[in-house]
Image (cartoon, grey):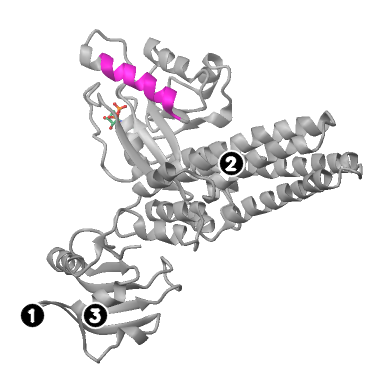
Amino acid sequence: MSTIAAISTAPGIGGIGIVRMSGEEAFIILEKIFKPKKELNTNDIKGYTIKYGHIVSKDETIDEVLVSFFKAPNSYTTEDLCEISSHGGTYVVKKILEVCLKNGAVLAEPGEFTKRAFLNGRIDLSQAEAVIDIINAKTQKEAKTSLNQLEGYLSKQIKEIRELLMSIMVDIEASIDYPEYDIDEVSNKKAYEVLLQVKNKLKLLSESFDNGKIIKEGIKIALIGKPNAGKSSLLNAILKEERAIVTDVEGTTRDTIEEAINVDGIPIHIIDTAGIRNTKNKIEKIGIEKSRKMADEADLVIAIFDASKELDKEDEEILEILKDKKSIVVLNKIDLSERKISKEIIKEKLKNINNEKIVEISAKEYIGIEEIYSKIIEMFSLNEINVDNSAIITNVRHKEIIMSAIKETDKAIEITNKKMPIDMIGIFIKDIMEALGKITGESVSDEIIKEIFSKFCLGK
Ligand code: GDP
């Protein structure tokens, strides 16, 4: 394999910039461009050591650097690898990379270092995928779930399932090899029991995706209400900063504003929709349609009403949208003495709502905002999401593979139920194994591998 090089730190100005080089010739190339303070023989360099010196090109000194050495097989890629830490300026880091390339390294593709770690067998595919998830993680829970995956929690589960399947295969082989012994009946019963265990394990993994999706993508909340109900004020109160425009003029929030907050380690995306209004005004109409669409696409709808005014036709239209959605009704402006909408009125109009789902607030005075948070936490059982010591599926690709493995398991169970010859189960077991191999990477096509690593950043 060629020796690859890339800038591993984010572009821009920073304290330190790192150029990483990996491959058989990494140290040989380095020797040509690195002038260490103390003499250095790259042949007997020790792994996990750092050397001080300068990177030079011809006679030009480019920067003062520290080089970290990792010797095969004890490196990220399992190959000889070095990391040149220089000053983090745009010019210097690029120049160092350029010098590496001029002296024989080739520019790494996105994710190629991690791809090599996978191809060289240090990590499996699910662990490689975890690397990108850690990099992209925005909350503690997301980072922890991905770290667990990198440390092999998911791989371990898959390994256990495969071992169970292998135990059935051993029986099948035996029944083929020794047809004179009638072991079909015993094996069939055992196969059935083991397959049930396999199904249970697969189901637990697939169910973990409900939480996994929340951890990774968060919850999408559409904030709806007619103009002047207080959507922008509530959003501001939630964000505790003046980001959305608060205004007295009706319908100025025509498009949508999306903000993300972090509640108990879960990303919550709040989409402030335009006021839902019946109007002939074309631009406003776009806003209304958008509001309805947003509500449709959201996991939760928060509908806000100005409690100091009577419910009118427009408010009723909004209530209509809530009928078959997970929703919270917010009665705003309770700081005003005028009070026209009560919880009772809402409950009369909306049969599927109870007191628990109605919150009285004053966005202006910051009253009741915390209660909205607790409702969200309660409705999605956010405080029950435990990311410690467990394999949680957050990746749609994994979820789909597990679903197809469950289908194959069902087919195999059906065959054992019908007491058919045990070797017939073998076909399905091989299919389940193959499906699981797509998660760990043993039975996955080159195109899929390429697609997975193309999502990585350069230098990783
Ligand atoms: P939107 O059109 O739904 O986004 O509503 P805004 O957030 O722009 O609020 C409309 C008006 O109602 C503004 O003048 C706000 O100051 C006012 N308002 C919002 N929330 C409250 C509240 O809790 N109490 C009072 N008294 N006024 C509020």
Q: CA distance from mark 3 to mark 2?
A: 46 Å
Nearest the eye: 76 or 64: 76
Mark seen at residue 134: none
Local crowd size for mark 3, using a 10 Å CA cut-off: few (<14), some (14–19), many (≥20): some
Q: CA distance from mark 2 to mark 1?
A: 56 Å
The x and y percentages for residue 121 are 50, 61
The x and y percentages for residue 113 are 36, 60
Total tally of numbered discs in the picture: 3
Q: Quadrant of the C terminus?
A: bottom left
Q: What is the residue that sits farthest to the bottom in this orientation?
A: 38
Q: Residue at x 25, y 76 (%)?
A: 30
Task: Name the amino acid, label 3.
Answer: Glu
Nearest the eye: 284 or 181: 181
User: Is 289 one of the magenta-colored residues?
Assistant: yes
Q: Is residue 184 above or below residue 3?
A: above
Q: What is the residue that sits farthest to the top in this orientation?
A: 280
> In the rendered view, does 385 fall on the left or right side of 450?
right
The disc, 3 or 2, on the residue closer to the chain's N-terminal end is 3
> In the rendered view, does 256 fall on the left or right side of 204?
left
Q: Is residue 2 above or below residue 42?
A: above
Q: Main secondary structure of the magenta part?
A: helix
Mark seen at residue 435: 2
Query: Start and end of the magenta stretch?
Result: 285-298
Q: What is the residue that sits farthest to the left in this orientation?
A: 59
In the figure, residue 180 lies in which quadrant? Answer: top right
User: Which residue corresponds to mark 3?
Assistant: 31
User: Which residue corresponds to mark 1?
Assistant: 59
Do we see residue 380 in this rendering? no
> In the rendered view, does 191 fall on the left or right side of 59?
right
